[in-house]
Amino acid sequence: MGNCIQSAQDVAIDDVPPVTAQPSHPSGTVEDSEHTSHPLPTPSTPLVPSNVNDKTRVVLPIPRPESEILSSPHLKSFSYIELRNATRNFRMDCLLGEGGFGDVYKGWLDEKTLTAAKPGTGMVVAVKKLKPEGFQGHKEWLSEINYLGQLDHENLVKLIGFCLDGDNRLLVYEFMPKGSLENHLFPRTGRPLSWEIRIKVAIESARGLSFLHQSDPQIIFRDFKASNVLLDSEFNAKLSDFGLVKAGPTGDMTHVTTRVFGTEGYAAPEYCATGRLTTKCDVYSFGIVLLELLTGRFAVDKSRARPEQKLLDWVRPQLPDKRKLFRIMDSKLEGQYNRKGAYVAANLALQCAHIEPKYRPQMSEVVSILDKIPSLKRSHSGASSIDSSDEASDTLSLSEATLWKNSNVRSQRSKVSPCLSHQMEKLPKGTPLPAQRTMSSRSDGAVYTRR
C-alpha cells in the first residue's frame, strides 16, 4: 500500500469510535441490491448503503471485537480448501498481482452456493492471500473485513467473504476485469484512456471518498492513489484496499493521531510530519491523482530531470498562464480533450493539493465541480489555447467557480513552497518533529496490481 513512516501512536481497530452513515438503496432495503451481485444468506442487519437522499441514519456497531467482525452476516466465511480449489491450487497462471500484503489470484465460485467452481464457469472473483509473516498484515486484513463488511456503495469494491483457517488469511472480492487505474494510466502498451473515461474515473473516485467522509464519524481512506482505484468492464471506478482506513475525529477533536502510513508523493505533508490525520489528507491525495489523470505522469518519477521529478512542483508554476495548459496535458490524448474542463480540473487539483489544509475543498465540493465538467461546451480540438476562465466556468456556480479560479492566487500568496510527501516546510509553530523515523515498504496497491 505504500511507504510507512512510524511516528505516533497507532489507533487499533478496537479503538475506532462508532460510525453513522446514510442508507441508500431506492428500494429501501440493502439485501436485494446485495444479492443481485452475489448471493449470500439474508443478513439480519443491513449494510450501510449510500443514498444521500434518504436521511435515515444507521449506527454501525464499532468498535467491535475481532470475533464480532468475523461474524458479519454480509460475508461468507470460506475454508482454505474451498479457495484453494477455486483458484486451481493458487496456480501461477491464475496470479493477478503481487504486493506487500500478499498475492492476488483469479478464482471461480458457483453463483448460488459460493462454492468452488470449474474455471470458466460460475462467478469470477479475486482472492487475496495474506503473506504469513507480520502482525500488521493481520490488522489490515481485519480492517478490510471491518469496513467493507458494513459499507455498501457503488464506488467501493465489494467484499464477498474471507478465510481464517489456521495461519491462512484470505479475502475474496468481486472481480474487476479492467484492473487498476494505474495500469491503464501508465501502460507499457495498449490504448491510452480517453478524456471522457479519465473524467468519469475522477468523478466516481471522488464520490467514493465523499461517501466515506460523510459518514459519522468520518472515515478516512488514508492511502488514496491510482493503484487503489479499480475498474470494471465499463470503466466504472471503485476504491479498493481498505487496510489502512481509519475512523476520523469525533466530538471536539480536530484530528486523529496515528502511525504514518502512505505512499510518497500522495501523502499529505502535514500528516507525514505530525501523524495528524484528517479528511483533508484524502483530499490532498485526490488532487495528486487528478493531476496524474490530466498529465499521464507519476506523482514522483525519479527517472525524469530534477525539476520534473515531483509532479505537483512541475505543474504548479505553469497553470497561472492559461495558454500553457497544453504543456502539462498528457500527450497520449493527442489534443482530444475539453480545454475548458481540463483547466477547471487542473486548478481544482491544485486546490485539493494546497499546502494549507484549510484551503482544500471538501470532497462533496469536489464532486459537485467535477460533475459539471462533462457538460462544459467543448472547444475546438485544434485550438492552441483555451477560452477565458469566465467562459470556462459558465456552468459552475459562483462559489465553485471561485474555488478553482483562485487556487493559483492562494498558492502564490503562501509564503512556503509546495510540500510533497516527507517535506515539512509548513508546520505549526513549536511543533516537534517526529523522532527517528524509518521507512518500510508496503506497496500492495490495488487488489490486483502487479508491481
Image (spheres, helix red, strand yellow):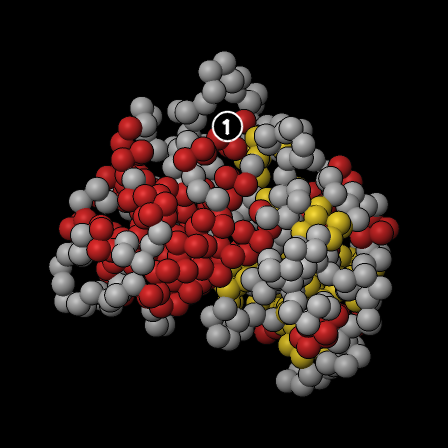
Query: Nearest the camera: 53 or 302?
Result: 53
Q: On the image, numbered disc 1 is attached to which residue?
A: 273
Say what secondary structure mark 1 lies in: helix
Residue, x 80% and y 79% (percent of image)?
A: 113
Query: Image quarter for residue 415?
Result: top left
**Residue drawn at (71%, 46%) of the image:** 19
Pointer 1 local density, CA inside 10 Å: few below 14, some 14–19, many at least 20? many
Question: Image point 73% across, 40% down: which residue?
Answer: 16
Q: Quadrant of residue 41?
A: bottom right
Where is residue 285 drawn, in percent x and y?
46, 45
Q: Position of residue 435 (x, y in %)?
A: 57, 21
Using residue 133 as the reference point, say whether residue 294 is left or right of it.
left
Q: Residue furthest top?
A: 430
Q: Give the x, y percent position of residue 124.
A: 64, 77
Left or right: residue 260 versus residue 117 is left
Q: Which one is in front, 294 or 97?
A: 294
**Is any part of residue 257 visible from this angle?**
no
Q: Residue 397: x percent and y percent?
A: 35, 51
Whether residue 158 is visible here, answered yes or no, is yes
Q: Amino acid at mark 1?
A: Ala
